[in-house]
Structures are given as C-alpha cells and as structure tokens.
Amino acid sequence: MEKLKVYADRMSQPSRAVLIFCRLNGIDFEEIKIDISKRHHLSPEFTDVNPLQKVPAIVHGNFNLFESHAILVYLASAFPRIADHWYPTDVLRRAKINSVLDWHHSNLRYGAVNYVTNTVLGPALGRPLNPKAAAEAEKVLSSSLSKLEDIWLNGDRLFLLGGFQPSIADLSLVCELTQLELLDEKDRDRILFPYKKVLRWIEDTRTATNPHFEQVHDILYRAKKKFQQQRSRVAKTGTDNSSKMGTHSKM
Ligand SMILES: N[C@@H](CCC(=O)N[C@@H](CS)C(=O)NCC(=O)O)C(=O)O
C-alpha cells in the first residue's frame, strides 16, 4: 500500500491531533501542508481529497477520508502495533470514547473556536472582532469545561474516562484547548483557572505525548508571540494593525 498522506495545516487543532497521533505511533506518513490562509484548501486538487474543503484529510492507497475523529479511529484500527489505550478494543470503552468525541464538536470545539475567532483571530481572517459573539461563545466554552471537569475527569486518574494512558479523545480535546494560548493571558486565566483538573489534564496529555506535542504546536506558539507583541504595541501606541498580521490560518 502507498504511504499514508496527511493533508494538514498545523494552525488547525484537528490537524495537529492527527499529526501528533501519526508521529507518536511511528506511522510512516507524508505531511502535505494545506495553508488555509493561502486558501490551499479551496484548490481543485484538495477538493478531490475532501469535498468539504477542510483539514485534516488523509489518502491511504485508494482510500480518502476526512473528519479528524473518523481519521483517528481509522488510523488506530488500520495500522498495526498501535497501543490499545488510544482506541481500546474493549467495545464499552470504545463506545465511551466515541461519546466524548461526538460531544466535542458542538460543545468544547464550538465554544473555543468561536471565542478565539471573535477575540483574537478575526481580523487576521478578514473578519471584525465581535464581543457579543465572544460572550456567547465563552458561555458555551465555560459550560463545556465544567462538564469535562465534573463528568469525564471525575476521578483520580490522569486521563478522560478514568484512563491511565491517553486515548484519541484526550489528544483531540487537548489540541482544541491549546488554541487558547493565543488569548490575552488575563482572558485565558479567567476561562481556564476555575478548572484545576482540566489544567492538570492538559499538562498530563502534553507530557504523555511529547516531544511530538510541542514540535507540532511550534507554529501556534510563534503565533502566540506575534499576538502578544501586537497587544503591547496597541497598548503603547493605541494603533491596531492586527488585520495585517497575516496569521497563518483559520483554526
Ligand atoms: N469536524 C472537522 C473540522 C474540520 C475543520 O473545521 N477544519 C478547519 C480548520 S480547524 C478548516 O479546514 N477550515 C477551513 C474553512 O472552514 O474554510 C474535523 O474534526 O476534522
């Protein structure tokens, strides 16, 4: 079978989850960069791979697949020697992981993406910041964090659903939350600090998946620095040129 191709933009949270998973598990793959800020995802070549024009997507031989959770499930099931904890063969544990993954899209991801877009990223994407939409998104985000803390991290184990080791759900959800690094520190602290278990779990997942986690997130940390510099410039001069920042892409 031909080498796996992963179409990804490292500024995209679900892309990062797929890339980290492949690297951690020694999957032989080729990373094909789809830069959303340069509209590569709208090209006819990529549309053949993913008609939804979103990253990540994969091609494995004649088979193409999009939607990061479906991709993670496929990789964990199709490749040999993937440790069982990522997507356990036990049907009941698997079902519980699927339930967290399904919940994620319209709750944690919805809140995080909309909050970050409406407070930080918007101008770089050609959209105005929208404080009203940000306030709505913060409600969804905080409610999701509270559910994570009370339902899935409710125990003394390190990972979701009482896991001793991370699953694809830990990887997906933590990669989503790392985009909060782009926020002004006081906003990030206000949102995350009430959730001590969530904070510990982010660190534990990071540690369990390093050095790949940090390497794949490098682009995000560089964007974070740019936003910090821009905020200090605005504080000093009162001028905002955020629309010219050219931040790499939509998250
Ligand atoms: N549910 C999808 C979400 C994919 C998605 O929204 N990707 C974003 C980047 S994080 C994208 O490609 N956006 C391009 C656009 O919407 O134009 C998944 O988990 O793969």
Image (cartoon, rainbow, N blue to C red):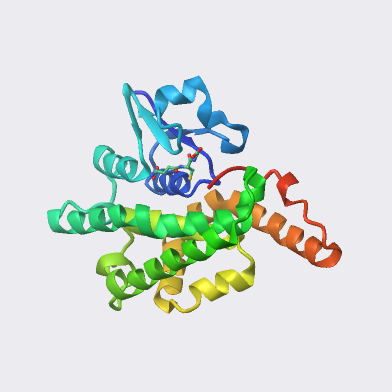
- Where residue 246 sits, quadrant-wise, is top right
Q: Of all residues shown, which one is farthest toward the left?
A: 91
Q: Is residue 12 above or below residue 3?
A: below
Q: Residue at x 33, y 60 (%)?
A: 166
Q: Residue at x 66, y 46 (%)?
A: 124
Count of numbered circles in the view? 0
Q: Of all residues shown, which one is farthest toward the front?
A: 132
Q: Decide which of 241, 152 is in the foreground and name it.
A: 241
| Residue 5 seen from this side | yes
| Residue 209 seen from this side | no
Residue 81 in the image, given as x and y percentages of width and height: 27, 44
Q: Residue at x 55, y 57 (%)?
A: 116
Q: Decide which of 20, 174 is in the foreground and name it.
A: 174
The quadrant in which the N terminus is found is top left
Q: Is residue 168 above or below residue 9?
A: below
Q: Is residue 70 above or below residue 3?
A: below
Q: Decide which of 151, 166 is in the foreground and name it.
A: 151
Residue 3 in the image, given as x and y percentages of width and height: 39, 27
Residue 118 in the image, given as x and y percentages of width and height: 57, 56
**In the visual, does 55 lie left or right of 119?**
left
- Where residue 176 sits, quadrant-wise, is bottom left
Ligand 1 shown in quarter: top left
**In the visual, does 99 lie left or right of 130?**
left
- Where residue 66 sits, quadrant-wise, is top left
Residue 106 in the image, given as x and y percentages of width and height: 36, 54
